[in-house]
Image (tube, rainbow, N blue to C red):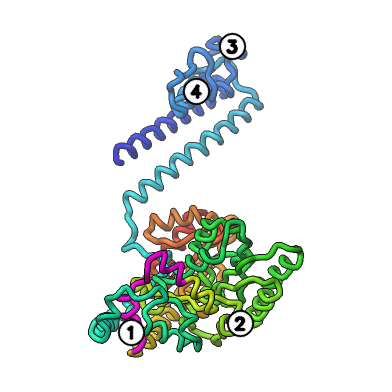
Amino acid sequence: MDREIASTLGELERKLHELERTLMDIGSRSQPGGDGAPGRRTVAEGRLVDEAIEPREPAAPAPTASLSTQRARALQGAASGYGQPPSAAELLRFRERLERTARELTHDYDELLGRLRAAESPPAGPAISFARGAPSLDIIDVRGLREAAMRAFESDPGGTTAYGTAVGYPRLRAWIADRHGVEPERVLLTNGSMQADAFLFEQLVRPGDEVVVERPTYDRTLLSLRKRGARLQAIELQSDGIDTEELARLLGDRRGSRPKLAHVIPNFQNPAGHTLSLAKRDALLALAAQYGFIVFEDDPYVALRFSGESLPTMVSMDPERVVYASSFSKTVCPGVRVGYLIGAEEEIAQIAELATNTYISPSMVAQSIVYEFCASGAIERSIETVRAALAERARTLAQALRRELPDAQFVPPEGGYFMWVTLPTGTDVGALQRAAGELGVSFVKGSDFMLEGGENAMRLAFAGVTPAQIEEGVSRLAAAYRSLA
Ligand SMILES: Cc1ncc(COP(=O)(O)O)c(C=O)c1O
């Protein structure tokens, strides 16, 4: 690296000297009595301006010469002396060339500076991740989980260590059913809700089927649906949820073609943090009934509300038309990999068959531990710990952004893990991500959550960072943003 930097610097310095020599030469020749010794070259030969860049014989560069060497030789050609002072037009053209060369030099120089800065000044402290949608260790009830694990093996060694069944560990299945006020037959447990999504898509979506998604939406949903060959219809997400009027217009304009499924993250959406209003829940269900599609309610953040009123789940509003998924990843910890689906009994039975053929059964050990954790009441304490910590983190993030990055626009979320931040149009968030990375801060680009667009937006996850890290992270982010100017 040192040798590379030294050679780049040497090259830049050489170019600069050549430029200086050229300028001095022009200056002296355009002065009365300057070193414009007539007869050294004719005016016809001495196309000063053009030769400054494109020297003619014999100074033509060897084919192997690098561009910078060619430029250097060209400049040298101009510096070698001409008989006549240049005309105003020639000088003007030369000025343009000079400007272009200066821009190129500055670009090389900036690049070098960036590399030097990255090499010399490693991040101002430990890396800070606004990228990961996972809780930090300090808000995970590790002790409660350890105790739950002990109880799981003591109270039900047979059930905990068995294959079990594809629908999940029976006691946890019953506990979830009770919590949602549904029959256990309508519940199926999976290894994380991502697996639940995958089963549902496998069950319902065929290549070419249309699926409505929010814009933006969870990147893994997009990936999973694309892999299944679905035709994605992205509908704008507003601060009160998916734009149901746009969806109604779209469905009304068409005759015949109907979506199979609408995937919606109703509470504290990933990535935008927005929540679907009650009026829009009604509107969406009405459209689902009118046009005969299923609503997939993907709801892992529902328990983590900081403010405002809790809203009914859509599955409770229309049990026939909605399939619901949730998870213990966000309220207990992602490592347990326990998620679940609630749907019509028949649908769940079909998915159970799919699950059996896929992996026989999900992890009974994990589900038995989660059951003990839930049955003991530790789940309520865990939710409260995570909820309170995240409320403070969201507040800290909003305050820090307002103070450090006033160009940032966002709607503070009423719960969950994420904040969606929009920067002025034209901001290159990809470049910001690279600059922030050099300062030890990461986030996910807005464009990762959309089929197209989102270039000036980003998702900041605040669940995995403490308030002190948020303060530091935002100040580094703001420094990275300023460096783009
Ligand atoms: C909307 C949404 N659905 C599903 C998942 C997957 O969660 P799990 O860890 O339960 O697989 C996530 C995780 O970030 C998510 O945000």
Q: Specify start and end residues of the magenta stretch as a single range.
A: 352-375
Badge 1 or badge 4: first in the primary sequence: 4
- Mark 3 is surrounded, within 10 Å at the Cα level, by few (under 14), some (14 to 19) or many (20 or more) other residues, namely few
Q: Is residue 357 above or below residue 41?
A: below
What's the amino acid at mark 2? Answer: Asp
Amino acid found under the numbered disc labelled 3: Thr
Question: Which numbered mark, 3 or 1, is in the foreground of this view?
Answer: 1
Q: Is residue 359 found left or right of 148 in the rendered image?
A: right
Element type at mark 1: helix
Give the residue at mark 1: 373
Evaluate if marks 3 and 1 touch, with contact meaning CB atoms under 8 Å apart. Answer: no
Instruction: Give coordinates of residue 216: x percent, y percent.
Output: 57, 65
In the displayed structure image, the side of residue 219 where residue 374 appears, left or right: left
- Residue linked to disc 3: 42
Q: Is residue 468 visible?
A: no
Q: Which residue is mark 4?
A: 74
Q: Position of residue 473 (x, y in %)?
A: 40, 66
Q: Residue at x 70, y 62 (%)?
A: 257
Specify the farthest residue to the top: 39
Mark 2 lies on a secondary structure that is loop
Asked whether disc 3 touches disc 2, contact meaning CB atoms under 8 Å apart, the reply is no
What's the amino acid at mark 4?
Ala
Q: Residue at x 56, y 24 (%)?
A: 31
Instruction: Tell us which disc is closer to us: 2 or 1.
Output: 2
Q: Residue 304, position in %: x, y?
A: 46, 81
